[in-house]
Image (cartoon, rainbow, N blue to C red):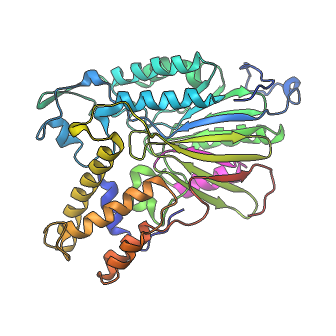
Amino acid sequence: MKTLKIYNTLFLVFLVCSCSKNLVDYQDFNQDFNEANRLTYAMPHVKIAVLGGLNYLDPSLMIDCLDEGSDFRKNFSFNNSVFEFSNPVLDAAVSEIMTENPDLLLITGKLTCRGEKISHLAIAATLKEISEQGIKVFVIPGALDIDDPLAMAYSGSGSVPTPSVTEEEFVSIYNDFGFKNAISRDPNSLSYLSQPFNKLWILGIDSRPALVKPETIEWISHWCAIAKKNNITVLPILSSNVIEAWTNEAILAPPYMIEEHEIVEEALTKAGLRIIFTSPAVDISMNSDGENVLYDISTMPILTPPFPFRIINLDPNFMQIETRYLTSVNATVPGGAELLDYSYNLLIQNLTRLLTYGFSAGYGLPVGDISTPGTAAYYALHIARADATYYGGDEQIPPEELEISEGWPELFKQVLRSMYTDSPPPDRQYTVDMREKIKE
């Protein structure tokens, strides 16, 4: 969990931008829980893969559009994802997941770049291949996955609109990945509750547009009460943070937070949920009401370096969380560079560009260049590196950055050091006690 003392600058960053086991298959449930099934099985040990979003843009929507000055480059000049490598990164992620052979794959929203129908259809085809290997897949829409008017097809230097999807089309496309065999569907959103195995429920929470409706909270609370009564573990997935990863995130980075997050946070904690899976960054944050503890386990979308995903081992008592990173992607990169190096450099370049503008316009600094102390570009580069480190989790300030920032103006020094400071619990590897009463 990150705490920042200086908030205005960070706002600029966010402006634009398994073992053999006795398992049972899906069962159809009525809204009145079937008492005959209450104690038939204990929850098995389950292995889970978590992707914090795909941000996928189908290659057919990117035709000879990568030159500088093109609409593609202009539209994504501040973005953190390498959309042009959507296919090879997705292929690498699928390969890793197949090797891990989890029981479940959870994708916490942000499936497409801007809700392009072509992208959705391609993702659904890939998820079908995964599910045919015996891996149960669950998805939920992100803020830009449905009815996005900025869904574009890029060709040459220009771009034209391309169809997005309606809510009905989204459910139809992803029907096999959470919706079809749902125990319950929320009548006020695309939220659903599904049971992959006895004593384990997946709760897909539709948080568009960065909002969980009061009626949906009531629906969640109702089913959480049933789960608690019947000793059932519930794992929610949604695309926005519920618990702030750093102080005032809800005010300064609203695209990544649920609106009225305190109400949602309190309701989910009171309902007895232990875990929620979200997607803005590699981070674990927590909230306690004095009796219950809720962990917000966030994972950066797979198209943003360092290309993270989570592997979870869950039993009735503990959840062991591990973070993995794609280390080999079969992609042709300009100049023959490795994709991780290329994407990291692009990330630093885009963040530096954004921060340079913010420091110059917001604080009156001369633009300057990255090698000239006291200029906007100089501070922007160092803070961009800190931000990129934060994306990977468990960030620590390098000794040289600590030393070089010693003589900086207090504003920029605190921003840099805050972004390199990670508060407990650890972000990458952690074990959560899933029992009802825990001591923290």
Q: Nearer the viewer, residue 204 or 388?
A: 388
At horizontal 89% and vertical 30% (from top left) the residue drawn is: 39
Give the position of the C terminus as an image quadrant.
Answer: bottom right
- Is 142 drawn above or below residue 265 in the view shown? above
Number of callouts = 0
Residue 94 coordinates in the image, percent (x, y): 49, 28
Q: Is residue 148 visible?
A: no
Looking at this view, name the residue that lies furthest to the front.
Answer: 336
Q: Nearer the viewer, residue 248 or 396?
A: 396
Residue 415 coordinates in the image, percent (x, y): 37, 71
At horizontal 82% and vertical 24% (from top left) the residue drawn is: 34
- Is 306 drawn above or below residue 26 in the view shown? below
Image quadrant where residue 14 sits: bottom left
| Residue 66 within the magenta-colored segment of the rendering | no
At horizontal 42% and vertical 47% (from top left) the residue drawn is: 306
- Is 49 drawn above or below residue 126 in the view shown? below
Residue 226 falls left or right of residue 338: right
Q: Nearer the viewer, residue 293 or 215?
A: 293
Q: Is residue 295 visible?
A: yes
Residue 423 falls left or right of residue 334: right
Image quadrant where residue 313 sits: top right
Q: Which residues are magenta?
A: 261-280
| Residue 271 within the magenta-colored segment of the rendering | yes
Residue 248 falls left or right of residue 361: right
Residue 114 falls left or right of residue 392: left
At horizontal 42% and vertical 69% (from top left) the residue drawn is: 398
